[in-house]
Every structure is written in C-alpha cells, then in structure tokens.
Amino acid sequence: MDHAMQTGHHAHPATAPAAGPPPVSTVYTCPMHPEIRQDHPGNCPKCGMTLEPVMPTLEDDDNAELRDFQRRFWWTLPLTAVVFVLAMVGHRLQWMDMAVQSWVEFALATPIVVWAGWSFFVRGAQSIIHRSPNMWTLIGLGTGAAYVYSVVATIAPGVFPASFVSMGRVAVYFEAAAVIISLTLLGQMLELKARSQTSAAIKSLLGLAPKTARRVKPDGSEEDVELAHVHIGDLLRVRPGEKVPTDGVVTEGSSAVDESMLTGEPLPVSKRVGDKVIGATLNTSGALVMKSEKVGSTTVLSQIVQMVAQAQRSRAPMQRMADVVAGYFVATVVAVALLTFFFWGVFGPEPRWVYGLINAVSVLIIACPCALGLATPMSIMVATGKGATHGVLFRDAAAIENLRKVDTLIIDKTGTLTEGRPVFDRAIPAAGLDADEVLRMAASLDQGSEHPLAAAIVAAARERKLELDKPENFESGSGIGVQGQVGSRHLALGNTTWMQQLKVSVDALKPQAESLRLEGASVMHLAVDGQLAGLLAVSDPIKASTLEALTTLKAAGLRIVMATGDGLTTAKAVGTKLGIDEVHGEVKPQDKLDLVEKLQKEGRIVAMAGDGINDAPALAKADVGIAMGTGTDVAMNSAQLTLVKGDLRGITVARLLSEATVGNMKQNLMFAFLYNALGIPIAAGVLYPMTGWLLSPMIAALAMSFSSASVIGNALRLRRSSITWGQTSSSPQ
C-alpha cells in the first residue's frame, strides 16, 4: 500500500544520546576523481589536483593552496618579467656579454622553476609513479626539459655542437620555463577561485542554520545553548523572528513559519501543536515551543547539504569517457613530442636540434589536458548548485546526464500526486438528520481514535466550532471501525465490513457511497443505535501544482503512468481528474519494481517518482529515481533526485537543467578537443614549411591557460541560465 494516511516521517525514541556522533576527521577528495578519499590533505594520485574537503564548512573561505599559489606567483612575477625582457631584447640592447646574460637568466629563472614550480614537478613525478599520465606530466616534462637544457648550455656550453651557438652563446630558453611556470600558476589561481564558487550553494545552505537554541529546562527555566549541544527530546522555545533551531514537532503555541529558504514556498506555513517544523526556517509571528526530533547530520538541512556535496563530487558517464581518453591522449602527446624533436633534429634547418627541443616543449605544453579534465566536473558542480537553489537536489552526476533521456514517468499517488494526508470532504446525512450533526457525532466518537482518518474528522468538526461530547466505552475494530457511547447513544463508525459485522444495513445511502468512491474518497458509515445515520467522506486532496506539472510533462513527450497501492476505483478516479490514462491500482512494492523492469525491457528510459518506503525498490531500479522531499528518508536515500518542495513541477526544472548541463559539457569537451586538434600540429611546426610560423612555448602556455579559462567560464554560464517553473523542456532525446 501507499503510505497514505501517514505523515511520512519516522518515529523517534523519546530519549536519545547527544546531538550526534562524535566528530570525525575531515575526509579529503579530488574534484575530478571522487573515488579518491583520504583523511589528510594532499594531491590526487590520478590527476595531481589538490584534494579538498568532502564537506565544505563556513570556515573554508581561507584557501591555503590559493594563498600559496598567489604568494609564489606574485613573488616571482618580477623575475619572470626580467627574464622575458632579457630574452626578447637583451641581445639588441647589448647590456652585457651574451654568455654573462645566460648566467643572469639562470640566476633569475632558478627560483621561479625550483621554488614557484616545485609542486608542479612533484605532481608530474607522482603521475609517472602512479602510471596515471595527466596535465602535470606534460608540464613537468616540458618546463623541465627547457630548464635542464638551458642550465647545461650555461654551465657547460662546450658539450654542444657548434650549430647550437647563436649570437655568441649556446641558445637558452630560461624565459620559456619561467613564463610557463608563471602562466600555469595564474591558471591554477583562476581555477581555484572558480572552484570555490561552486561550493557557494553549500555554504549558503550551511549559513541558514542558527548558531544557538533556547532550551527549556525541566524546572521551566530557559538557557541559550550552542546548536551542537541540543539533544533529541529537548524542549526548545522559538520566539518571533528567530530561526527554528532543528527539526521537530510543535508542542505549544502557534505561528506562521517561513520555509521559503528550504522549500521555495513564498507564503508562510501555519504551524500548530503537533505540526512538524524544519530546522533553519524562520518563525515569523507567534511564539512556539517545540520538541527536538532530529539533530546534527540527521536534520533536513544537513541531509540537503550532504546530497549537494555528494552530487558535486560524482562523475557523469561522459566524464568517465573523458578520463579514459585523457590517459591515452597524454601518452600520444609524449610520442608526438618525441617525434617532433627527432624529426626537426634530423630534417629541420639549423640549429636543427634547438628547433627540435623548443617545438617538442611547445607540443608538451599546449597539449596539457587540464581543459579536458575540467570539462564535465565544472559543469556538474555548477549545475548541482543551481539545482539546489530551485529545490532540486541531484544525488549524482549520472542523474543529471540521464534525466533528459527519460521518456516514461511512473508516479506514485499518495504524497506524490496528492497531499498524502487525509482531509475531511463532506458528510451526507440519512433522512431526518443534518450534515453538521452527523459530523459532530462522528467527531465526538473519533476523539478516542488515533487513526489519521479520525484525526481529519475531528479537525473538521473543531474548525466548524461544533461542540463535541466525550466518548465512553470506546472500542476499536481492528482498523475497520470504532464504536462507543456518546451521551445516551451507542455510535459506530467504519467501513462496509464493520457495518456488516454490526448488522447495520447501508443500502439507504449505497448510491451516494459509490459516487463518493468514484471521486476517490474514502467512505465511512455512521450508525446510531443500530441504524444508519449518514456517510462521511475523507479524501486525499490532489496537490495544487500537480495538474500543471503533468500537463507540462506530457507536452514534453513523456508517457505518464500511475502506480499506487490504493484501490483501483480510487486510483482511476484520481487518474481521470488528472488525465492519466494508464493507471495501476492495488500494487505492492514488488509490483512497482516489476513495472519498472517491464518498461525498461521494452526499451523505455524510466523515471519513478514517489515518497514512501514502499516506493524505495522502484526508485532504486529506475533509470532516474525521483523522491519527494516531503516523504520518507528511505525514499530520498533510494532516489537520485529529490524535489525539496514535493512539487512535481520540479521534474520539469530538473529536465531543463539536465539538458542545459549536458549541452554545456559537450561544449566544454568540444572546446578542449578542438583546441588540442588545432594547437598540437601548430606547435609541432607543420605550418613552418608554408608560412615560417613556429609556436613559442610561452605562447603555448598562454593558450593552455586560456583553454582552461574558457572551459571554466563556459561552465559558470550555467549559473546565469534562465530556468523557471513554467518552462517546457524539449522532447526526450
């Protein structure tokens, strides 16, 4: 069955230990290879990128690596500028003997290469040790070859043949190594700043949580405590204008709570005794006392933060392809560089081997695969952050990539299409009675019941300010009905089976009961002293946004299927109201799973939307599982996508974001591959015979940085993309 008539929240023990598990050491991971995890900072053994904490904190603004790179860049930039000027115009100005100038360039370039660029060489060496060639392999080989060659040419010029002598010295290329190091540092600084922007969504979520809570002690006194010291079961006072400290239930007072910061719902939500409240939401008017039910990492806010962080670390299938290509690509580039060196050395003009070395270094530098490596992670990180601001939480990158392909959507009814909670619909009296009297008698009896249907009837009577009597000798009939004494009358309330057991005829109102069932309502019969007194209908209202959401999804070409544990009559009634032709009623969790598998075998790309524990198997099996944020934790843990507001219109937003993100990833990969396809041949010198053009290693380094910057900039465009609730996504691809 659906979890109809349940709240969708787990029960919590009355007592609990401290606010959460003991603190654990920070886990570090690679932005490009999330499978790399360790308990200390360092560099990724696969790509060399600096590891960063899996879970950002508000105190992470001080980026140690960025500060280190900035220090190295700015301290050595003047040296790089001097080396560059000497190399370009020193021989014309004749400031000093050219052999002396080589020693000056050596002295200036050595701090740049050895100190400023040391981490690059370490990463390059690690890439070789781990047999994982990457951008640092190429940078290390390129700058290392240029620097070592120049050092030997300065210290022992006699080991070179006469053809290497130019303008009174053996040609050196300290400026190439220095400028490449400086440009690479600049590129890393830009990348680190861009990466820090992708965690802005997480930090903004972390910033929502209040720092303290006001705890009510057993003696009635109150104290302010840090949020970390709040325990499950604590009573907390929330005054007007304060944030709700943690997840819990209202035990005293009433107010309107602004939940827009988490759900996007613009209007404050009324909260009374027994209503759930979410941590970090804003209490606008009345004072509340609440009992804490979830603290620490189990709160809704913490789970949202964890989901966003996990999604930003995950790799799309497209990224796995790019990683494989990058590995072969680096090996190919090294082979091309060696071929370039020997080809120029054997067949090129004098000084042949000098040309060979410089062109080989240019090939190594311009082919750096950093743009290729950043192409999809940057898009994923930006997209998950943007999705979070729209109440759409992606668990992993595969969901972002696959959602746009979905052509079939299976939807649970209760809590997904409907509100998931019973609401009193109407009372139909038997002859001689009125509707309010039927409701008053049923509510009086139901005060002794804890059933959600009973709660709906009692709530409706109180809203109408009907005077209720206290029931006596109350008995429950195994979930099918209740009976008891109200005043001088014996009342019974329940379904048809309960009436049959009590030998009460329901024929007088049978047509009305059938009509109500066809509308999707649950019908209960009220008997007074053994005679039918009336009917009471309780329904699960359809969410206000459901019809609009389904209309938009069908317009996008999706096949909509309803699968619910409710009776087939009720399910079809809801399906008719919403224009859903394919309805499956009375299905068990296994049936939902089988339905997903059946559609997948037909070649359909299936998404499953649900919110209950019974939906979890189908959510996990579907190509994309979509959980309602208003549902159970189990459903959200089984799904790849969570709609925080429980609003199906979020699926349209997610599809639009999926299409935009995949398009952005393809653009980034195209930039990276096109750049290398054009840059490597030019760096190797293929245009030299026709145009006399050669690509300086410095220009190659500048182009390499620009390629990474173009990929980062293109990914950040996603943050400015216009995605709204009313848009219609294109047809499935």
Image (cartoon, rainbow, N blue to C red):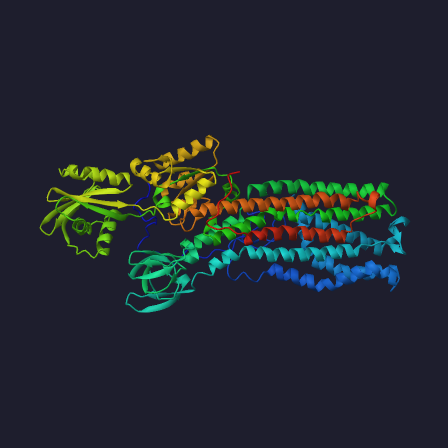
For this rendering, which residue is in front, 358 or 465? 465
In the displayed orientation, state which residue is furthest to the left.
488
In the displayed orientation, state which residue is furthest to the top.
602
> Which quarter of the figure has residue 585?
top left
- The percent coordinates of residue 384 (x first, y second) are 51, 50
Visible residue check, residue 247: yes
Q: Residue at x 76, y 51 (%)?
A: 697
Q: Is residue 160 left or right of residue 175?
A: right
Q: Give the vertical position of 590 relative to 702 (above or below).
A: above
Q: Residue at x 57, y 49 (%)?
A: 379
- The percent coordinates of residue 50 (x first, y second) are 61, 53
- The percent coordinates of residue 278 (x first, y second) are 38, 57
- The percent coordinates of residue 294 (x first, y second) are 37, 55
Visible residue check, residue 292: no
Q: How many marks?
A: 0
> Which quarter of the figure has residue 667?
top right
Q: Quadrant of the N terminus?
A: top left
For this rendering, which residue is in front, 482 or 119? 482
Q: Is residue 151 left or right of residue 484?
A: right
> Which quarter of the figure has residue 341?
top right
For this rendering, which residue is in front, 717 or 202? 717
Q: Is residue 478 left or right of residue 345?
A: left
Q: Is residue 430 left or right of residue 625?
A: left
